[in-house]
Every structure is written in structure tokens, then in C-alpha cells.
Amino acid sequence: MTDQRRQDERLLAGLRFLADQSEPAPRKDVWEAASAQVPMSETESTFVPSRPEPRGRNAFWFGTSTLGRAGLLQKSGDGLWSITDSGRQVLAEEPDPTELRKEATLLRAGDHQDADG
């Protein structure tokens, strides 16, 4: 599995984790659940030169920002995340992880307005 595919699988795992929560979850919990399902590769475990964290975790934070701007998850200012109704609809379609990322990127680039606020 390529690192990009791992990252895509992790984003989908994060959304699934949030869908199972009755309340918003700390971002750390989302990361731990997603990375437990899709462990980092050796390359992803190396540290980003400009940041004190592994490449895989850094990619996850950026990927979840894309999901947030696409209206699939909501991030509060205090580090709590929740899935939106749009995110639940996407999960119900059982998307391919890579297609999910690509579509979220397109939604982010457009004038998408999330009905969840």
C-alpha cells in the first residue's frame, strides 16, 4: 500500500470513528483511532523537518482540514471534532478512500456551503 493510500484510508477511518461518537471527540482521539486502524509506514514515521511530528500525522492534520472545508467534519476552536450530516451521508455511500479525498478536495475548491453550519 502506498503512503498516499494509507493517508486516504486513515481519513476515512477518522470519519468512521467520529460517526460512532455521541459527542465531539478530541482530535488526539481521532488520530489514535485512525492510526490504530491504519498504522504509519516506515516513511510516514519519519519526522517532518519543520515540525516536531511524524509525516503521517502531519498529513492526517492537513487531510482533515480538507474534509472540514468540504463540510464533512467540523472542528471547534478547542480541538473537538465531530462529523457533519454531510459526512454521515458520504459514509453511508461506503466511499473508496482515495475518491473521498479527491472529491473533498474538489468540494473545498468550490463554493460548497455545509448545511450543518
Image (cartoon, helix red, strand yellow):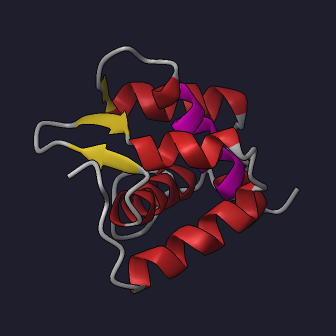
Within the magenta stretch, is there residue 25?
no
Q: Residue at x 50, y 53 (%)?
A: 60
Q: Residue at x 25, y 45 (%)?
A: 75
In the rendered structure, the answer to whether residue 17 lies left or right of residue 41 reads left
Of residues 88 and 32, the one drawn nearer to the viewer in this rendering: 88
Task: Read off the magenta span.
Answer: 8-17
User: Hey, which residue is sitting farthest right in the picture?
Assistant: 1
User: Hey, which residue is sitting farthest top in the picture?
Assistant: 22
Of residues 107 and 97, the one drawn nearer to the viewer in this rendering: 107
In the rendered structure, the answer to whether residue 64 lies left or right of residue 106 reads left
Q: Position of residue 90 (x, y in %)?
A: 60, 49
Within the magenta stretch, is there residue 13?
yes
In the rendered structure, the answer to whether residue 14 lies left or right of residue 28 reads right
Rendered view: 25 above or below 105: above
On-image quarter of the N terminus: bottom right
- Name which quarter of the figure residue 70 lies in: bottom left
Of residues 48 and 91, the one drawn nearer to the viewer in this rendering: 91
